C-alpha cells in the first residue's frame, strides 16, 4: 500500500514536469496510476487480512491509508490519514483503528477506543475523502520499532500501514536506598539513551501509584529542577523524599516510574530494604520530676543496622505533641542492633495524670518505634504508706515494711498512736493504757522530701481465749479411762496459761492434756476452762456417756454327780460387780425348782441330767448368768461294817440292788483301816 502511494506520487510529479503533454495523455496516465495504486493497495490490504485469517468479500467498500505520522516530540498520540477511494462502492464506515506491534514471533493488536480518536469513531468517510485521525495512544514503549497502523470498517476492507517510529529511550539506571542514613529518601538515576533522537524533559517520578511532589525532588548536589532536560547520552541523579515508614513499604517489591513531558516513561521494579525495628520497652512518669519522663528504647537483634534516636511523639485523647526531644542518659543516641538505652524527654506531664498516652519514638533516619501505651499514674514516684499490726490485748506490734516508693527510697517512718504518744521506725510496738478505739497514723517521707500518710482505727481490748478440746471416746464404760486434749485452744491476742477440767463426777484436773476414769455409769458434762495471760477465761463442754458394766455370775457346787435325794450345795458368793453390788441371786435347778439365796442347798428326787442356772442382778439392774450341768444317779447298796476301834464306817460297794454279792472273804477291819490311813 505504501509503495502504491509512492508510485502515485512519482507519477504526479512527472505530470507536473511534463506540462507539454496533452491533457488527454495526462488524464490517461492519472487514470492508470490511480488504478494501479488502488490495485496495489487492495492487494496489500487483502494480503494482510488473509494472513490474519480475515475473509475479504468481493464488491465491498475498501479504504487505503495514505500516511501515518508518529511525532517524536510527543509519544502520546499518532496521526493516520485514511482515503476512501472515489472508485469505492460507497461510503466507508471506519469503526476502529489499531496499532500492531511485534515481539519476536508474536504480534499484539492494540485497539484504540473510538473515544480516544479525533474525530471519534465510528466515522463515515465518503468516496474520494481522506480525513486524518488523531489517535491518543502512548506508543513510547515502541519507539525505534516498526509498527503497523490498521483500520477496520463496519462492512468493507480496511487498510494497513507500516511505520518505523523514531529512536527515543528513557532509562532508569539505578535506584538506591541507604536507610542507615535516611529511611525518608532514595536516589534515582535517570538517563536519556545514546540512541535517542531528541532531548527529554523529566517531569514526574512515581513510587508505585504515589506521585512524589516536585518540591520533594532535587538534583543531587543541586537545586530543585523538575522538569529536568536530559540530552541524549546524558543522565542525572535525583534525590526523592519519600517516607517508607509511613507507607509501610519496607522489605517489599515496588515499581519506580519516571515520566517526561514528551510522554516517554521508564519503569524499574526494586526491592526495598528491611526496616530498623525499634520498641519502647518501658516508660517512667514519676514524681517529683513532673517536667520530664523517661523512655527505654531497644533496637531489636533483627534490625539491619543502627539507628539514632532523636525525638518522640506524645498523643493524649485530645492533643498531640510532636518533636518532644529525647536525650540519651549516656550521651550517645545511637542504638546498635540488640542494644537498648534510656532517654529523658523534657515534657511536663503533670496535667495528664490519670490519662492514657500513646508514645512513639523517632530516629534521625526516619524510623519509628512501635506505639507504646502508658497510663500516667498520678501517684507514681510518691511514697506509699502501708502498715499492719498485731494486737495482743493492750500491746500492739506495728509493721510498716509494706510501705514503698516506686521511684525513690523511704527514709523516715513517723507514728502517731492516737493516745498522745508518738513513735518512729519501720517496725515498732506500743502499749495502750486502756481499752478503746485509737486512730493510729503512719507518715512516711522519701529521699525527695515527698511524703504519704496511712491511718487505721484499732480497737484495743483483751480478746478472750478460745476453749476447745477433744476426747479419746465420748462413750465409755465405767472404769475405762477417758483422755482429754485441749491443745487446740488458743488466745487470739496472747497466750493460754491455764487449763482447768471439771469431769462432772466430782473429779477435776489441770493441764492441756488430762485423763479421767468414771466409776459410775451415767451422762456427764465434762467442762474445760482456759485462762489467758491477762486473766480472761473461756469455757467449752462435751457430753461423756458412761455405760454400766454388767455383773459377773459365777458359782461353785458340792458335787456335779449327786445321788438321788442327796443334798447339793450351790455357792454364788464368788459372783461380783466391778462398778456396784449384786442385789439379787436367782437359781434355776433345772427340775422346776429355784432359790434366791446366795448359797443354796438342793436335793434331786430323781436321777437324770439337770442344767443349773444362776442369775445375778446388780444395783443398776444389769443381769448376768452362769450355768453348769449336773448328773444325778441312783444310789448303790450300802453295807455297814463295825469297826471296833474307829467306830462305824459305811462302805459303798459297786453292786446294784438287783445283783447283790456277799462281802469278800478277804475283807477285814484292819484292811479297811489301812486303806483309810493311806487315804
Image (tube, rainbow, N blue to C red):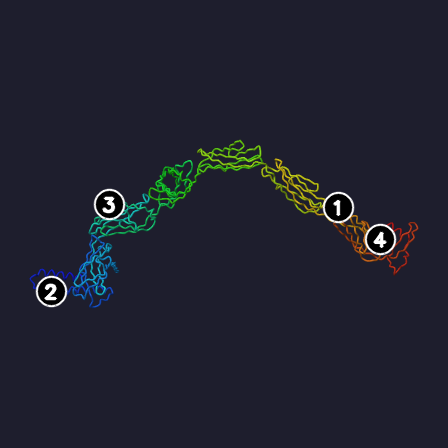
Q: Are marks 1 and 4 in contact (CB under 8 Å)?
A: no
Residue that extends furthest to the right in the rendered view of this protein: 644
Q: Residues within 10 Å of mark 3 (few under 14, many from 20)?
A: some
Residue mark closest to the camera, 1 vs 2: 1
**Residue beneath label 2, please?**
29
In which quarter of the view is residue 632 placed?
Answer: bottom right
Residue mark closest to the camera, 1 vs 4: 1
Query: In whole angstroms, how far apart are the C-alphas of marks 2 and 3?
Result: 60 Å
Query: In whole angstroms, how far apart are the C-alphas of marks 2 and 4?
Result: 191 Å
Query: In whole angstroms, how far apart are the C-alphas of marks 1 and 4?
Result: 32 Å
**Residue beneath label 1, please?**
580
**Residue beneath label 3, please?**
225
SS class, disc 4: strand
Query: In whole angstroms, how far apart are the C-alphas of marks 3 and 4?
Result: 158 Å
Number of the label disc, if any, that sits on residue 567: 4
Q: Earlier in the sequence, mark 1 or mark 4?
A: 4
In which quarter of the view is residue 93 placed?
Answer: bottom left
Query: In whole angstroms, how far apart are the C-alphas of marks 1 and 2?
Result: 171 Å
Q: Are marks 2 and 3 in contact (CB under 8 Å)?
A: no
Residue 145 is situated, as x and y percent measured from the top left of the image, at 22, 56
Amino acid at each position: 500500500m505504501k509503495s502504491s502511494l509512492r508510485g502515485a506520487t512519482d507519477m504526479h510529479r512527472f505530470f507536473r514536469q511534463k506540462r507539454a503533454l496533452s491533457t488527454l495523455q495526462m488524464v490517461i496516465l492519472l487514470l492508470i496510476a490511480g488504478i494501479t495504486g488502488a490495485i496495489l493497495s487492495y492487494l496489500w490490504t487483502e494480503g494482510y487480512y488473509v494472513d490474519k485469517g480475515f475473509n475479504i468479500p468481493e464488491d465491498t467498500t475498501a479504504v487505503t491509508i495514505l500516511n501515518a505520522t508518529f511525532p517524536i516530540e510527543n509519544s502520546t498520540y499518532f496521526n493516520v490519514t485514511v482515503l476512501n477511494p472515489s472508485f469505492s462502492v460507497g461510503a466507508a464506515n471506519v469503526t476502529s483503528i489499531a496499532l500492531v506491534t511485534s515481539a519476536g514471533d508474536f504480534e499484539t493488536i492494540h485497539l484504540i477506543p473510538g473515544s480516544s480518536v479525533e474525530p471519534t469513531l465510528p466515522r463515515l468517510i465518503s468516496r474520494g475523502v481522506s480525513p486524518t485521525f488523531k489517535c491518543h495512544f502512548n506508543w513510547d514503549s515502541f519507539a525505534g520499532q516498526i509498527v503497523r497502523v490498521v483500520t477496520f470498517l463496519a462492512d468493507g476492507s480496511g487498510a494497513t500501514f507500516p511505520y518505523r517510529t523514531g529512536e527515543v529511550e528513557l532509562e532508569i539506571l539505578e535506584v538506591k536506598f541507604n536507610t542507615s542514613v535516611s529511611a525518608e529518601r532514595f536516589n534515582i538515576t535517570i538517563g536519556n539513551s545514546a540512541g535517542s533522537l531528541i532531548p527529554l524533559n523529566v517531569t514526574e517520578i512515581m513510587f508505585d501509584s504515589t506521585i512524589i511532589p516536585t518540591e520533594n525532588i532535587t538534583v543531587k548536589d543541586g537545586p530543585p529542577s523538575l522538569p529536568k532536560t536530559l540530552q541524549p547520552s546524558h543522565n542525572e541523579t535525583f534525590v526523592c523524599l519519600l517516607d517508607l515508614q509511613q507507607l509501610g513499604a519496607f522489605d517489599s517489591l515496588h515499581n519506580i516510574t519516571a515520566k517526561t513531558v514528551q510522554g516517554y516513561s521508564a519503569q524499574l521494579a526494586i526491592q526495598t530494604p528491611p526496616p530498623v525495628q525499634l520498641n519502647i520497652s518501658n516508660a517512667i512518669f514519676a514524681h517529683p520530676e513532673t517536667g520530664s519522663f523517661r523512655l527505654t528504647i531497644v533496637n531489636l537483634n533483627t534490625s539491619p543496622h543502627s539507628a539514632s534516636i532523636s525525638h518522640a511523639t506524645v498523643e493524649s485523647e485530645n492533643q498531640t505533641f510532636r518533636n518532644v526531644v529525647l536525650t540519651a542518659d549516656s550521651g550517645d543516641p545511637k542504638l546498635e542492633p540488640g542494644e537498648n538505652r534510656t532517654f529523658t524527654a523534657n515534657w511536663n506531664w503533670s496535667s495528664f495524670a490519670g490519662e492514657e498516652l500513646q508514645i512513639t519514638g523517632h530516629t534521625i533516619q526516619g524510623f519509628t518505634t512501635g506505639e507504646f501505651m502508658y497510663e500516667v499514674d498520678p501517684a507514681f514516684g510518691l511514697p506509699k504508706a502501708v502498715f499492719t499490726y498485731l494486737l495482743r490485748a493492750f500491746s500492739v506490734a506495728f509493721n510498716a515494711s509494706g510501705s514503698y516508693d516506686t521511684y525513690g527510697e523511704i527514709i523516715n517512718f513517723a507514728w502517731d498512736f492516737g493516745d498522745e504518744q508518738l513513735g518512729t521506725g519501720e517496725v515498732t510496738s506500743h502499749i495502750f493504757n486502756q481499752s478503746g478505739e485509737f486512730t493510729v497514723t503512719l507518715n512516711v517521707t522519701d529521699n525527695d522530701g515527698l511524703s504519704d500518710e496511712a491511718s487505721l482505727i484499732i480497737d484495743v481490748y483483751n480478746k478472750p481465749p478460745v476453749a476447745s478440746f477433744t476426747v479419746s471416746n465420748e462413750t465409755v464404760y465405767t472404769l475405762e479411762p477417758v483422755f482429754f486434749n485441749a491443745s487446740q485452744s488458743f488466745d487470739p491476742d496472747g497466750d493460754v496459761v491455764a487449763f482447768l477440767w471439771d469431769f462432772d463426777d466430782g473429779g477435776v484436773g489441770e493441764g492441756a492434756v488430762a485423763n479421767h476414769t468414771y466409776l459410775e455409769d451415767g451422762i456427764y458434762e465434762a467442762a474445760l476452762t482456759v485462762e489467758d495471760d491477762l486473766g480472761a477465761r473461756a469455757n467449752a463442754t462435751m457430753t461423756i456417756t458412761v455405760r454400766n458394766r454388767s455383773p459377773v455370775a459365777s458359782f461353785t457346787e458340792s458335787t456335779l454327780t449327786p445321788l438321788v435325794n442327796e443334798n447339793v450345795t450351790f455357792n454364788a458368793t464368788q459372783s461380783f460387780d466391778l462398778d456396784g453390788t449384786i442385789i439379787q441371786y436367782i437359781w434355776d435347778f433345772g427340775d422346776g425348782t429355784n432359790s434366791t439365796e446366795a448359797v443354796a442347798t438342793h436335793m434331786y428326787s430323781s436321777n437324770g441330767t439337770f442344767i443349773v442356772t444362776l442369775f445375778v442382778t446388780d444395783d443398776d439392774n444389769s443381769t448376768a448368768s452362769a450355768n453348769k450341768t449336773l448328773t444325778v444317779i441312783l444310789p448303790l447298796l450300802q453295807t455297814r461294817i463295825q469297826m471296833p476301834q474307829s467306830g462305824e464306817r459305811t462302805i459303798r460297794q459297786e453292786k446294784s440292788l438287783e445283783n447283790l454279792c456277799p462281802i469278800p472273804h478277804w475283807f477285814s477291819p484292819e484292811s479297811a483301816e489301812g486303806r483309810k490311813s493311806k487315804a
